Amino acid sequence: MNMSKTKLMTNSLKHRLEVDGVEIAYVQEYIYLGQLVSFQARQEKEVARRTENAWKSYWSMGDIMKGNLPLTLKRKLMDVCILPILTYGAQTGSLTKHQKSTLKVCQRAMERSILGVRLSDRIRNSTLRSKTQIADVGQKAASLKWNWAGHVCRMSDERWAKLTTEWSPLNVNRRRGRPRRRWRDELDAYEKDWPQKALHRDEWKEGREAFALQWDDHS
Protein backbone atom coordinates (compact mmCIF):
# COMPACT_ATOMS: atom_id res chain seq x y z
CA MET A 1 0.00 0.00 0.00
CA ASN A 2 1.37 3.39 -1.03
CA MET A 3 0.55 5.51 2.02
CA SER A 4 1.19 8.81 0.24
CA LYS A 5 -1.52 7.98 -2.31
CA THR A 6 -4.01 6.41 0.10
CA LYS A 7 -6.86 8.69 1.18
CA LEU A 8 -10.19 8.32 2.95
CA MET A 9 -13.60 9.61 1.91
CA THR A 10 -16.85 9.28 3.82
CA ASN A 11 -20.37 10.66 3.77
CA SER A 12 -20.79 9.80 7.45
CA LEU A 13 -18.80 10.33 10.66
CA LYS A 14 -15.03 10.50 10.40
CA HIS A 15 -12.91 8.20 12.54
CA ARG A 16 -9.17 8.38 12.93
CA LEU A 17 -7.46 5.57 11.02
CA GLU A 18 -3.80 4.63 11.12
CA VAL A 19 -1.92 2.02 9.12
CA ASP A 20 1.58 1.11 10.31
CA GLY A 21 1.62 4.25 12.43
CA VAL A 22 0.67 6.54 9.55
CA GLU A 23 -2.62 8.42 9.79
CA ILE A 24 -4.72 8.26 6.63
CA ALA A 25 -6.02 11.69 5.62
CA TYR A 26 -9.65 12.39 4.77
CA VAL A 27 -10.33 14.27 1.53
CA GLN A 28 -13.42 15.77 -0.11
CA GLU A 29 -12.50 14.49 -3.56
CA TYR A 30 -9.87 12.32 -5.18
CA ILE A 31 -8.68 11.27 -8.62
CA TYR A 32 -8.87 7.49 -8.97
CA LEU A 33 -8.13 5.61 -12.20
CA GLY A 34 -8.39 8.85 -14.13
CA GLN A 35 -11.77 9.92 -12.76
CA LEU A 36 -12.81 12.35 -10.06
CA VAL A 37 -14.43 10.76 -7.01
CA SER A 38 -16.49 13.26 -5.04
CA PHE A 39 -19.79 13.53 -3.20
CA GLN A 40 -20.36 17.13 -4.33
CA ALA A 41 -21.06 18.05 -7.98
CA ARG A 42 -18.85 15.21 -9.13
CA GLN A 43 -20.14 14.96 -12.68
CA GLU A 44 -19.96 18.72 -13.28
CA LYS A 45 -16.35 18.80 -12.12
CA GLU A 46 -15.51 15.66 -14.08
CA VAL A 47 -16.85 17.14 -17.33
CA ALA A 48 -14.76 20.27 -16.71
CA ARG A 49 -11.69 18.05 -16.20
CA ARG A 50 -12.37 16.16 -19.41
CA THR A 51 -12.67 19.29 -21.52
CA GLU A 52 -9.54 20.79 -19.95
CA ASN A 53 -7.53 17.62 -20.56
CA ALA A 54 -8.89 17.34 -24.10
CA TRP A 55 -7.70 20.86 -24.91
CA LYS A 56 -4.28 20.10 -23.44
CA SER A 57 -4.03 17.07 -25.70
CA TYR A 58 -5.29 19.07 -28.68
CA TRP A 59 -2.72 21.83 -28.30
CA SER A 60 0.05 19.30 -27.68
CA MET A 61 -0.63 18.36 -31.31
CA GLY A 62 -1.13 21.97 -32.37
CA ASP A 63 1.48 21.82 -35.15
CA ILE A 64 -0.53 19.06 -36.78
CA MET A 65 -4.03 20.33 -36.04
CA LYS A 66 -3.26 23.86 -37.27
CA GLY A 67 -0.76 22.84 -39.91
CA ASN A 68 -1.16 22.32 -43.64
CA LEU A 69 -1.72 18.58 -43.33
CA PRO A 70 -4.50 16.33 -44.66
CA LEU A 71 -7.82 16.62 -42.87
CA THR A 72 -7.97 12.82 -42.76
CA LEU A 73 -4.94 12.82 -40.43
CA LYS A 74 -6.49 15.42 -38.15
CA ARG A 75 -9.74 13.48 -38.09
CA LYS A 76 -7.92 10.33 -37.07
CA LEU A 77 -6.14 12.14 -34.24
CA MET A 78 -9.45 13.53 -33.00
CA ASP A 79 -11.09 10.12 -33.08
CA VAL A 80 -8.15 8.28 -31.50
CA CYS A 81 -6.68 10.85 -29.08
CA ILE A 82 -9.27 13.53 -28.24
CA LEU A 83 -12.66 11.83 -28.18
CA PRO A 84 -11.49 9.10 -25.77
CA ILE A 85 -10.56 11.87 -23.32
CA LEU A 86 -13.93 13.61 -23.65
CA THR A 87 -15.84 10.35 -23.28
CA TYR A 88 -13.67 8.76 -20.58
CA GLY A 89 -15.90 7.12 -18.00
CA ALA A 90 -19.06 7.75 -20.04
CA GLN A 91 -20.06 4.13 -19.50
CA THR A 92 -20.81 4.69 -15.82
CA GLY A 93 -21.85 8.34 -15.81
CA SER A 94 -25.19 10.12 -16.02
CA LEU A 95 -24.90 13.47 -17.75
CA THR A 96 -27.37 16.34 -17.64
CA LYS A 97 -28.31 18.26 -20.80
CA HIS A 98 -25.96 21.06 -19.74
CA GLN A 99 -23.05 18.66 -19.31
CA LYS A 100 -23.75 17.03 -22.67
CA SER A 101 -23.79 20.49 -24.22
CA THR A 102 -20.42 21.30 -22.62
CA LEU A 103 -18.80 18.31 -24.32
CA LYS A 104 -20.40 19.18 -27.66
CA VAL A 105 -19.32 22.83 -27.44
CA CYS A 106 -15.75 21.71 -26.75
CA GLN A 107 -15.72 19.42 -29.78
CA ARG A 108 -17.22 22.04 -32.10
CA ALA A 109 -14.64 24.59 -30.96
CA MET A 110 -11.89 22.14 -31.88
CA GLU A 111 -13.48 21.49 -35.27
CA ARG A 112 -13.60 25.23 -35.97
CA SER A 113 -9.95 25.46 -34.94
CA ILE A 114 -9.02 22.65 -37.33
CA LEU A 115 -10.90 24.28 -40.20
CA GLY A 116 -9.58 27.74 -39.39
CA VAL A 117 -12.99 29.35 -38.92
CA ARG A 118 -14.26 31.52 -36.07
CA LEU A 119 -17.44 31.38 -34.04
CA SER A 120 -18.32 34.82 -35.42
CA ASP A 121 -18.35 33.33 -38.93
CA ARG A 122 -21.65 31.73 -37.90
CA ILE A 123 -21.14 28.51 -39.81
CA ARG A 124 -23.77 25.90 -39.02
CA ASN A 125 -22.75 22.94 -36.89
CA SER A 126 -24.00 20.55 -39.56
CA THR A 127 -21.72 22.24 -42.10
CA LEU A 128 -18.71 21.89 -39.81
CA ARG A 129 -19.44 18.21 -39.26
CA SER A 130 -19.94 17.51 -42.95
CA LYS A 131 -16.45 18.88 -43.59
CA THR A 132 -14.58 17.25 -40.71
CA GLN A 133 -16.48 13.93 -40.66
CA ILE A 134 -15.37 13.51 -37.03
CA ALA A 135 -17.43 11.18 -34.85
CA ASP A 136 -19.89 13.03 -32.60
CA VAL A 137 -18.77 13.11 -28.97
CA GLY A 138 -22.31 12.74 -27.68
CA GLN A 139 -23.16 9.74 -29.80
CA LYS A 140 -19.81 8.17 -28.93
CA ALA A 141 -20.53 8.57 -25.20
CA ALA A 142 -24.05 7.18 -25.57
CA SER A 143 -22.77 4.16 -27.50
CA LEU A 144 -20.24 3.43 -24.76
CA LYS A 145 -22.95 3.60 -22.11
CA TRP A 146 -25.27 1.38 -24.14
CA ASN A 147 -22.56 -1.25 -24.55
CA TRP A 148 -21.71 -1.15 -20.84
CA ALA A 149 -25.37 -1.42 -19.82
CA GLY A 150 -25.61 -4.62 -21.82
CA HIS A 151 -22.50 -6.05 -20.17
CA VAL A 152 -23.79 -5.14 -16.69
CA CYS A 153 -27.16 -6.80 -17.23
CA ARG A 154 -25.53 -10.01 -18.38
CA MET A 155 -23.19 -10.12 -15.36
CA SER A 156 -23.89 -12.16 -12.26
CA ASP A 157 -25.23 -10.14 -9.32
CA GLU A 158 -22.05 -10.80 -7.33
CA ARG A 159 -19.69 -9.11 -9.79
CA TRP A 160 -18.05 -5.98 -8.38
CA ALA A 161 -18.50 -4.17 -11.68
CA LYS A 162 -22.25 -4.64 -11.45
CA LEU A 163 -22.45 -3.79 -7.76
CA THR A 164 -20.48 -0.55 -8.14
CA THR A 165 -22.31 0.55 -11.29
CA GLU A 166 -25.69 0.22 -9.57
CA TRP A 167 -24.48 1.35 -6.12
CA SER A 168 -26.24 4.23 -4.39
CA PRO A 169 -24.63 5.79 -1.28
CA LEU A 170 -26.37 5.49 2.07
CA ASN A 171 -26.80 8.24 4.67
CA VAL A 172 -27.18 10.96 2.05
CA ASN A 173 -29.85 13.55 2.72
CA ARG A 174 -31.94 14.37 -0.32
CA ARG A 175 -31.32 17.93 -1.41
CA ARG A 176 -34.08 20.31 -2.43
CA GLY A 177 -35.14 20.47 -6.05
CA ARG A 178 -34.76 17.86 -8.73
CA PRO A 179 -33.23 14.55 -7.56
CA ARG A 180 -29.73 13.67 -8.74
CA ARG A 181 -29.61 11.70 -11.97
CA ARG A 182 -28.82 8.05 -11.48
CA TRP A 183 -26.82 5.93 -13.89
CA ARG A 184 -29.88 4.11 -15.20
CA ASP A 185 -32.27 7.08 -15.48
CA GLU A 186 -31.36 7.81 -19.10
CA LEU A 187 -31.85 4.16 -20.01
CA ASP A 188 -35.16 3.95 -18.13
CA ALA A 189 -36.45 7.04 -19.93
CA TYR A 190 -35.52 5.57 -23.29
CA GLU A 191 -36.97 2.09 -22.72
CA LYS A 192 -38.52 0.74 -19.54
CA ASP A 193 -37.79 -2.92 -20.20
CA TRP A 194 -34.18 -2.41 -21.29
CA PRO A 195 -32.74 -4.81 -18.64
CA GLN A 196 -34.66 -7.68 -20.25
CA LYS A 197 -33.66 -6.75 -23.79
CA ALA A 198 -30.02 -6.37 -22.75
CA LEU A 199 -29.90 -10.07 -21.94
CA HIS A 200 -30.03 -10.80 -25.67
CA ARG A 201 -26.66 -9.62 -26.97
CA ASP A 202 -27.44 -9.40 -30.70
CA GLU A 203 -30.76 -7.63 -30.19
CA TRP A 204 -29.09 -5.20 -27.78
CA LYS A 205 -26.39 -4.29 -30.29
CA GLU A 206 -29.05 -3.45 -32.87
CA GLY A 207 -30.56 -0.83 -30.56
CA ARG A 208 -27.31 1.07 -29.94
CA GLU A 209 -27.50 3.46 -32.88
CA ALA A 210 -31.04 4.62 -32.10
CA PHE A 211 -30.09 5.28 -28.47
CA ALA A 212 -26.98 7.22 -29.51
CA LEU A 213 -28.92 9.40 -31.97
CA GLN A 214 -30.72 10.97 -29.01
CA TRP A 215 -27.52 12.94 -28.49
CA ASP A 216 -28.12 15.23 -31.44
CA ASP A 217 -27.79 19.00 -31.19
CA HIS A 218 -31.31 19.28 -29.80
CA SER A 219 -30.81 16.89 -26.86
Image (cartoon, rainbow, N blue to C red):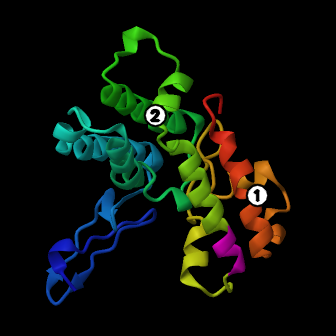
Magenta-tinted stretch: 150-154
Q: Is residue 152 magenta?
A: yes
Q: State which quadrant residue 194 falls in.
A: bottom right
Q: Amino acid at mark 2?
A: Thr
Mark 1, secondary structure of its residue: loop
* Quadrant in which the N terminus is drawn: bottom left
> Where residue 97 sits: x, y (%)?
59, 35
> Where residue 65 sits: x, y (%)?
25, 37
Q: State which quadrant residue 28 falls in.
A: bottom left
> Where residue 165 sits: x, y (%)?
58, 69
Relative to the observer, which residue lies in front, 140 or 173? 140
Labelled disc at residue 99: none
Give the residue furthest to the bottom.
Answer: 20
Characterize the magenta stretch by its predominant secondary structure.
Answer: helix
The residue that label 2 is drawn on is 102
| Nearest to N terminus: mark 1 or mark 2 | 2
Which is closer to the viewer, label 1 or label 2?
1
User: Horizontally, is 37 left or right of 191 in the view?
Assistant: left
Query: How far apart are the alpha carbons under marks 1 and 2?
Result: 26 Å
* Quadrant in which the C terminus is drawn: top right
Q: Is residue 210 magenta?
A: no
Q: Callout 2: 10 Å neighbours few (<14), some, many (20+)? A: some
Relative to the observer, which residue lies in front, 121 or 87? 121
Which residue does the image show at 37% across and 25% down from the upper left?
Answer: 112
Q: Callout 1: 10 Å neighbours few (<14), some, many (20+)? A: some
> Where residue 90 sits: x, y (%)?
51, 56
Which residue does the image show at 46% across and 34% down from the upper left?
Answer: 102
Q: Amino acid at mark 1?
A: Gly
The residue that label 1 is drawn on is 207
User: Horizontally, is 78 left or right of 16 in the view?
Assistant: right
User: Horizontally, is 110 left or right of 193 in the view?
Assistant: left
